[in-house]
Amino acid sequence: MAADWSTIASLGTAVGTLFLGVATFSSVRSANRTSKIAEESLQVGLRPLLVSTRPDDRPERVMFQDGHFVTVEGGRAAVEWDGDVVYFVIPVRNVGNGVALLHGWEVIPERFLGAQERPDPDAFRRMTRDLYIPTNDQGFWQGAIRDSDDALRGTVIEAAKNRTAMTIDLLYGDYEGGQRTITRFGVLPKDDGTQWIANVSRHWNLDRADPR
């Protein structure tokens, strides 16, 4: 029987197209994988992570917009009030790979123990100035409650007077505004009756999976 060269040619074209499609799929898949790895490497290189400063770190002298100054030693925190205004300062160290940009904060006049739910980032007080924390270096967070009608002002002042432990949550991300993270600090009264200690108790990732 004579060969049907038209059919053979069609089959050859089909087989060639199939191999080309497989090769293209493999190439695209490999390129996507490479792109994803490159993106993840870039994100890691930009990722900040804030913790408390060490006791031997330099003190931070912080000025507020009304001219009030607060000086805080390494590993400490400050809770002060003057009239209707309550001032907070926590020196922080960035142990991540990227610069940290602080977005907001929340203060709770009590200490959390055990299992903890992630705070709602929409409930945070926004920063009134941009604070950047360099990588492998220290900086500070500052906040103030100024409104006499603020529901928290009275309870926070009462907690400070009674030397009751408090919780402060900081919301921050990389310098491009991504990779948002919430770090929870416990602010505990020191035994000397005048100072406060700041300790990190929890981290939450908002834009990626948590590591636990």
Image (cartoon, grey):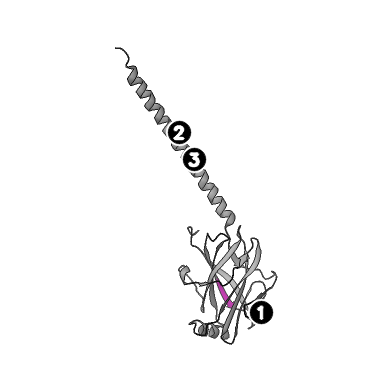
Magenta segment, principal secondary structure?
A: strand
Give me the residue at 33% from left, 19% from top.
Answer: 6
Judging from the image, what secondary structure is the residue with disc 2 in? helix
Judging from the image, what secondary structure is the residue with disc 3 in? helix
Give me the residue at 57% from left, 54% from top.
Answer: 44
**Amino acid carrying mark 1 in the image:** Phe
Where in the figure is residue 201, as x and y percent of width and height?
54, 69
Q: Residues within 10 Å of mark 2 (few under 14, many from 20)?
A: few
Instruction: Identify residue for label 2.
Output: 23
Q: Are marks 2 and 1 in contact (CB under 8 Å)?
A: no
Looking at the image, is mark 2 or mark 1 earlier in the sequence? Answer: 2
Left or right of 91, for residue 151: left
Instruction: Identify residue for label 1.
Output: 69
Where in the figure is residue 188, as x and y percent of width and height?
58, 77
Q: Is residue 188 magenta?
A: yes
Instruction: Identify residue for label 3.
Output: 30
Judging from the image, what secondary structure is the residue with disc 1 in? strand
